[in-house]
Amino acid sequence: MAHTLLVYRYTERRKALPTPAPAPPGGPGGEPPRPAAFVRDAPTLLSYAALGCFTFWLYAFGPALTLLRDELGFSYSLLGGYSVLWSAGAVLTGIGFPWAARRLARGTLLWCAALVSAIGAALFTLGGNVPVTLLGAGVLGLAGTMLLAVLQATLSDRHGPRRDRALTEANIGAGASAVVAPLVLGALAATAVGWRVTFALPAAVLAVLFLRYRRQPLPTTPRRRAAGRAGRLPLACWLFALLTAASSAIEFCLVYFAPQLLLDTGLTAAAASTALSGNLLGILIGRLLGAALTRRPGRSVTLLYASLVGTAGSFALFWLTDQPTVAIVGLFLCGVGIANLYPLALALTLDAAPGREDQANARSQLVLGLFAAAAPYLLGSLADRHGLAAAFALEPVLITGCILLLWGGLRARPRST
């Protein structure tokens, strides 16, 4: 009885005590909540490795066309046709990726795209005649871009608001592949093995990745219907998609025509072609710096503006000098500036379409494919009419356009985004 009375009195006293105030949101002391830790888990590492394989094919493709033309004896116009077919494949991926992403699991889509890419690489290298190798170029462009799209979607789904860091880190491996691929191609071309084995290397790596990760489920974010009319992406998303494509066009024009402009500084053709590796090395170093700077969220826009300004200054150094050493330094610094334009612009594109990331990803690849085909062709046409140095005025136009697209996209973006 005494025990029951004590319990009763204790309970009544507890009721009389003031109710403690709820803890403030966030961490201890009311600090704002910390962002989720960035984890490089199995899907992330798989995406990084597979993206390196695609980039290896992409940057081996251009030099391989020179060797293929030497063997098959086709014209320069037909050489351009191979690149157009690759770009056409990218455009088809931009149209078809949302449909495929709705019907196939991420893993199924990834491994099917990898298999078809390997088939395209085999057709391109082993075809032995122009029609089959042209078909291989188109298949590789289509399936390779599909592989790229699903890898970008996987990283976006996995890391959400931190996709800028994931995409920047993924492109470090891509930058390394860009540097290594032409060197491996040239080294194997000088041996009895032959340059064609170069295109088998990414296929072998993808096969190893399949054996290691084939049962690994890939993350996916449930897609909700965004506000507004069905199927319509926000204006900010389209502006950022154009920014992604235009910034890539800056790089494509340099890759295709910078060695030709270096000839005017007195370099030989072999030295000018080798000097292009300085630009690719700059891209790799720039992406390493970008990965370090994006470890903390909220720096993407500042880094994009700084990259565009740096690209403009370094391109002027490359374009306006007649000294080969200064031109090569300018080309290297162009690579540092260009390095983070694509991954950060793509991250903004996906951020601007919440719930429609797959559609935004696909449309960015569609626009990029169009720019990849049109910009080098336009620069080449201007060079035929007015000279290459004058034609390179297209680059400042593209850089200025990128700055305006970034500014416009940020203004069009909803305040809550």
Image (tube, grey):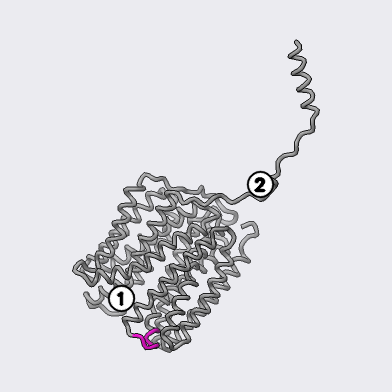
Query: Comparing marks 2 and 1, which lies closer to the viewer?
Result: 2
User: At x 33% / y 64%, what residue is drawn?
Assistant: 57
Nearer to me, 164 or 186: 186
Count residues near mark 1 (Cα–Cα under 10 Å), then give few for <14, some for 14-19, many for 20+: some
The quarter in which the N terminus is drawn is top right
Q: Please say if the residues under marks 2 and 1 sit with CB atoms less than 8 Å apart.
A: no
Residue furthest top in the image: 1
Residue furthest left in the image: 192
| Residue 262 lies in the magenta-colored region | yes
Residue type at mark 2: give it.
Gly
Q: Position of residue 385 (x, y in %)?
A: 41, 88
Judging by the rendered image, the residue that carries numbered circle 2 is: 26
Magenta-highlighted stretch: main secondary structure?
A: helix
Instruction: Please identify the quarter of the rendering in which residue 205 is found.
Output: bottom left
**Residues drawn in magenta:** 261-267
Nearer to me, 412 or 304: 304
Residue type at mark 1: give it.
Leu
Instruction: Please identify the quarter of the rendering in which residue 297 is found.
Output: bottom right
In the figure, 290 relative to 18: above or below? below
Element type at marker 1?
helix
Horizontal arrangement in the rendering, residue 363 relative to residue 67 (left or right): right
Is residue 384 at all visible to an observer of this figure? Answer: yes
Q: Position of residue 218 (x, y in %)?
A: 43, 48
Judging by the rendered image, the residue that carries numbered circle 1 is: 79
Horizontal arrangement in the rendering, residue 33 relative to residue 364 (left or right): right
Count residues near mark 2 (Cα–Cα under 10 Å), then give few for <14, some for 14-19, many for 20+: few
User: At x 58% / y 64%, what residue is drawn?
Assistant: 236
Horizontal arrangement in the rendering, residue 169 relative to residue 61 (left or right): right
